Image (spheres, grey):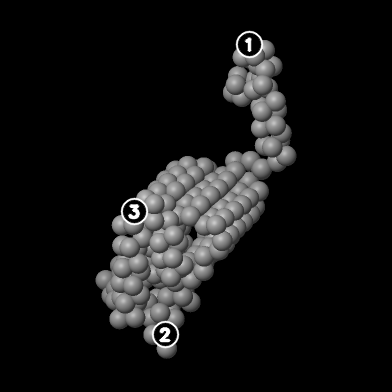
Amino acid sequence: MASKDWNNMLAGRLYNAQDSELTAGRLRARKLLFRYNQSAPEEESLRREVARELFGRMGDNCYLEPPLRCDYGTNIRLGDHVYANFNLVVLDCAAVTIGNDVLIGPNVGIYTATHPVDPGLRRDGLEFALPVTIEDGVWIGGHTAVGPGVRIGRNSVIGAGSVVTKNIPANVVAVGNPCRVMRPVTEKDREIWARREKMMRLHPQERSQILPHDEI
């Protein structure tokens, strides 16, 4: 039976992280992460086995480059075809749901954990957590921080170095600190690459006369 603090943690209420069940959960995760991160480069099957034990769910064809860090692992649910580059940190004190076909750059942090503003509550060792959801098709650039309670909408792109503190809608490019929507993702984004692919077959001199400078 889950402890009161474990239930409070998952419900977004104040909890004490030194609860014995939570401490045991973090130790379990660290042992599994040690095996994952110390594995040899060619031991991909071992990493896959450890990840399936660590996470609450891991879909098909997922790969997370070591080193990887998380608090519990059991609160992380991965869809299919998820790729994370080096040094992903997930503080999964609340649910972290990552959809299908998600790309995560290096040195990204996904943080559900947070602390009360009131210093007295912090001195009492109390904290709380809010869930994070990353929907299908999202690409998160390197060195991005995703804060507690955030949802990033389907197919959106988060620029490198962003600090995401509020929800990001679907099908947009967003960047900055704090992260803000810059523009929608449109069919033009596909057309640019189709045109560039066609032009790259031309002689460089012909190409420079046709392509805008920022597309050469």
SS label for mark 3: loop
Q: Is there a contact, CB below 8 Å, between mark 3 and mark 1? A: no
Could you say whether the residue bearing mark 2 is in a helix, strand or loop?
loop
Q: Residue at x 48, y 55 (%)?
A: 63
Judging by the rendered image, the residue that carries numbered circle 3 is 40
170 versus 32 height, above or below: above
Rounded to the nearest angstrom, the CA distance separating label 2 from label 1 is 68 Å
Q: Considering only order in the chain, which callout, 1 or 2, is on the residue closer to the N terminus?
A: 2
Disc 2: which residue: 2
Task: Work out how far the residue at label 2 is from the one at label 3, CA to CA, in angstroms.
Answer: 35 Å
- Give 120 or 163, whichever is nearer the viewer: 163
Dot 3 or dot 1, earlier in sequence:
3
Q: Name which residue type carries label 3.
A: Ala
Disc 1: which residue: 205
- Give the residue displayed 55% in from the left and 63% down from the top: 59
Residue 207 visible in the displayed image: yes
Amino acid type at image mark 1: Gln
Q: Look at the numbered disc 1 and give the secondary structure of its residue.
A: helix
Give x and y (percent) for residue 77: 52, 66
> Which residue extends farthest bottom?
1
Distance Cα–Cα, label 3 vs label 1: 47 Å
Residue 42: x %, y % from top left: 39, 52
Q: Quadrant of residue 207?
A: top right
| Residue 181 location (% of width, % of height) | 59, 45
Tell me where residue 182 sits by quadrant.
top right
